[in-house]
């Protein structure tokens, strides 16, 4: 609860700083505060406030994932600084991102379904606003409206599922819900609630067949907002989905397992096959993210031994996404022109940023010795141990397909001539985020136990 209160305090500071004419210190103070909070949270130095146990629970799972979310938010705020430098609504944009972080933390720390729903709505509403924040861009308007309508529909399904759980048990408390999930006398509509919540969460993580909103929303939203959707929002939704399943379906019925297997295969195949056809980098990242969702959903097939694997995969994927988006913002200058051709010759004109992009893409593809390789290795080892050998083979084939479309960007950067007169966004923030993310990908790959031992 202390972490949540501290995050809300930072968000309130961002709003008050504008009133007190302290606009210039909003971003530096926010980043420093978040990094300090990250250090205190991950080391367990924050004192806990008693009396909120019925709404928030603090354990290794919540601490590890909330620490990841805090780090991602700090880097996302730094990366978005050039885009908001001349904006008259700087405090609004930064405070929304900080408040979205509070929603993400609530999503992995809840001990009551009401707190879970509040968390997911705080995160979602912030994204609705930011997706349509470029009000003079018709694509941004379309993305905001489409995300709002589809997201509201999914939230309605989630809420209906939660009401089913309440109707069957008379409580929102996760402890009681867990006991009901393993009881032989549980009312049948409890399981209807589990099905509805599963459908709603499949939308939130952009899994097939609930993925249809993601490519258009990713493409139409401002690039710095797409970065949030692809990193913070996706891993927060996936972590909360995993926690929900450990509570509501801990016995993992065979029929439910079969549904998850089908969804995983469809998500990986559709994401990778569609990514092969894309000519815009943001759409490549969108479909790539769908395929990575398929990988992360595999952790649901063995929830008793998959917490570490989910944390490691989410960390490596999100950090690689940050590195990639730091280069995308550098190349496209936050303009509505993210064709792969814009990356032609980047290795000759800006070798450092080309190297950052290469490391990010290689990590997503699962190339040794980067973090993404070990993320897939640990996950596939878990799947094979659980007896899903055929699924592991399909996952390996999908990883090989992914290499092809990732290397389309790498080939453009190193083998083609740069476009004449091409101007890049030479902001130090992009360099800092890209370098930090690249170093983390290498370090996590060399020392995977540093992440695996957190849970």
Image (spheres, rainbow, N blue to C red):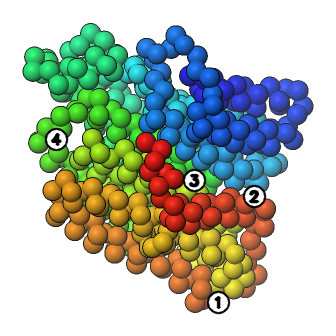
| Structural distance between the alpha carbons of marks 4 and 3 | 32 Å
- Mark 4 vs mark 1: give the one in front: 4
Give the mark, 4 or 2, whose residue is nearer the N terminus.
Answer: 4
Which of these two is toward me, 380 or 318? Answer: 380
Q: Mark 2 or mark 3, which has the lower sequence index?
A: 3
| Of 360 and 129, the residue lying toward us | 360
Disc 1 from disc 2: Cα separation = 26 Å
At a point 50% along the width and 68% down the height, the residue shown is 370
Residue 12 against residue 445 in the figure, above or below: above
For the residues labelled 3 and 1, the Cα–Cα distance comes to 27 Å
Residue 118, image x and y in percent? 48, 24
Quarter of the image for residue 378 reads: bottom left
Q: Residue furthest right?
A: 21
- According to the image, label 2 marks what residue? 429
Classify mark 2: residues with Cα within 10 Å, few (<14), some (14-19) or many (20+): some
User: Which one is in front, 87 or 49?
Assistant: 49
Q: Give the label, 1 or 2, closer to the camera.
A: 2
Can you tell which of label 4 and label 3 is closer to the viewer? 4
- Binning the other alpha carbons within 10 Å of mark 4 as few (below 14), some (14 to 19) or many (20 upward) gives few
Q: Residue at x 26, y 9 (%)?
A: 170
How far is the residue under mark 2 from the one under mark 3? Answer: 15 Å
Residue 417: assigned label: 1
Q: Which mark is residue 256?
A: 4
Query: In percent of the image, x 34 and y 70: which residue is there?
Result: 399
């Amino acid at each position: 609860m202390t972490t949540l209160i501290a995050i809300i305090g930072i968000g309130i500071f961002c709003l008050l700083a504008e009133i007190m004419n302290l606009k210039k210190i909003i971003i530096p103070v926010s980043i420093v505060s978040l990094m300090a909070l990250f250090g205190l949270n991950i080391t367990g130095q924050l004192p806990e406030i008693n009396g909120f146990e019925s709404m928030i629970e603090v354990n290794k799972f919540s601490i590890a994932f909330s620490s990841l979310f805090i780090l991602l938010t700090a880097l996302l705020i730094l990366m978005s600084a050039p885009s908001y430098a001349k904006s008259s609504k700087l405090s609004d944009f930064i405070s929304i991102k900080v408040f979205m972080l509070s929603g993400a933390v609530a999503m992995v720390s809840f001990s009551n379904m009401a707190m879970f729903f509040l968390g997911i709505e705080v995160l979602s509403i912030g994204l609705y606003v930011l997706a349509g924040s470029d009000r003079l861009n018709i694509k941004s308007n379309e993305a905001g409206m489409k995300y709002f309508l589809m997201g509201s529909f999914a939230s309605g399904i989630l809420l209906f599922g939660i009401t089913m759980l309440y109707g069957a048990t008379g409580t929102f408390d996760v402890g009681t819900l867990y006991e009901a999930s393993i009881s032989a006398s549980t009312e049948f509509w409890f399981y209807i609630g589990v099905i509805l919540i599963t459908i709603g969460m499949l939308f939130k993580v952009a899994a097939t067949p609930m993925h249809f909103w993601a490519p258009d929303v990713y493409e139409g939203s401002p690039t710095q907002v797409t970065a949030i959707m692809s990193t913070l929002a996706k891993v927060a939704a996936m972590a909360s989905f995993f926690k929900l399943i450990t509570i509501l379906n801990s016995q993992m019925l065979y029929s439910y397992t079969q549904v998850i297997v089908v969804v995983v295969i469809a998500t990986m195949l559709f994401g990778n096959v569609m990514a092969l056809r894309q000519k815009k980098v943001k759409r490549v990242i969108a479909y790539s993210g769908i395929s990575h969702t398929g990988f992360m959903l595999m952790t649901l097939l063995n929830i008793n031994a998959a917490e570490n694997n989910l944390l490691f995969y989410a960390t490596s994927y999100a950090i690689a996404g940050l590195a990639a988006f730091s280069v995308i913002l550098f190349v496209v200058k936050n303009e509505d022109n993210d064709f792969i051709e814009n990356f032609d010759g980047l290795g000759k004109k800006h070798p450092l940023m080309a190297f950052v992009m290469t490391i990010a893409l290689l990590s997503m593809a699962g190339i040794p010795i980067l973090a993404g390789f070990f993320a897939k290795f640990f996950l596939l080892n878990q799947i094979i141990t659980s007896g899903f050998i055929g699924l592991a083979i399909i996952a390996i084939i999908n990883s090989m397909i992914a290499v092809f479309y990732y290397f389309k960007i790498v080939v453009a950067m190193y083998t083609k001539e740069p476009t004449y007169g091409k101007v890049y966004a030479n902001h130090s923030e992009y360099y800092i985020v890209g370098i930090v993310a690249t170093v983390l990908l290498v370090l996590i790959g060399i020392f995977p136990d540093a992440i695996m031992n957190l849970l």
